[in-house]
Image: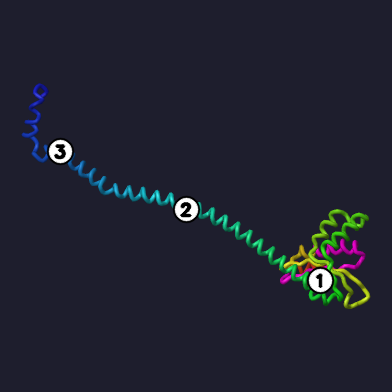
Amino acid sequence: LRDHPDWLDELRKLILTEELINLPKKFDEFVKQYQNFIENEFKPLKQTVQKQGEDIAVLKEDVAVLKEDVAVLKQDVGVLKSDVGDLKGDSFERKVRERAPSYFGKIIRKCKLISHIELANILDDALDTGIIGDDERDDALLCDIVVTGALRSDKERKVLIVAEVSVVVDKQDVERAASRTKVIEKCMGLPGIPVVIGKEHTEGALKRADELQVIVI
């Protein structure tokens, strides 16, 4: 057989059955068919998976954009709430200023509103004479309302009222009213009554008002 390799085919035909001889050929055909099957069956699946991957990528981008939009929206809502709060506060303060006699009528009579320009002049005069300092002047000028009048309990006694106005009165409003009253009464030479006015108030505000003897309306 080494000397005559061409005899091998004839030897195979004598020793092996036809099925065994054709087995390698059939195996090659089977492999090709299997490869075709895999390609035909899984190619659409690969395409589907690829498409889903692309869709997920787009979805991630959309979610990222949505998160950014929500973040901006939250900021806008926060600003809007702040603006609405300021607007409500300004509107309420203006209402109290315009109707000062009705708000302070149980404390004083012949209520007279002191304008901020008039108050600024009074504070500046007191600053020039050394009665108050710069910080006291600047803080007192931020008070919401100052009125003067005669006490209802003592018509001969003239007093001033320094009021802080807020939709919801808190402890800080009470403390500001108390400290600013002390400054303004020194400048005007009149005994002062600190007052806070609001539609609502916190428990802390009531407790602090009792401690500092501030009237809550």
Instruction: Tell me the quadrant of the picture where the C terminus can be found.
Output: bottom right
Q: Earlier in the sequence, mark 1 or mark 3?
A: 3
Front in this rendered view, residue 202 or 153: 153
The amino acid type, in three-letter code, at marker 1 is Ile
Residue 109 in the image: above or below residue 178: below
Residue 92 visible here? yes
Q: 10 Å neighbourhood of mark 3: few (<14), some, or many (≥20)?
A: few
Residue 54 image point, x, y percent: 40, 49
Residue 202 visible here? no
Instruction: Tell me the quadrant of the picture where the N terminus can be found.
Output: top left
Mark 1 to mark 3: distance in Å? 107 Å
The amino acid type, in three-letter code, at marker 2 is Asp
Mark 2 to mark 3: distance in Å? 54 Å
Q: Which residues are magenta?
A: 175-203
Q: Residue at left 92%, top 57%? A: 131
Q: Quadrant of residue 164?
A: bottom right
Q: What colour scheme does the image use?
A: rainbow
State the SS at label 1.
strand
Front in this rendered view, residue 19 or 120: 120
Q: Which residue is mark 2?
A: 62
User: Does 147 appear in magenta?
Assistant: no
Q: In front of the other: label 2 or label 3? A: 2
Q: Which residue is mark 1?
A: 215
Q: Which residue is mark 3?
A: 25
Q: Earlier in the sequence, mark 2 or mark 3?
A: 3
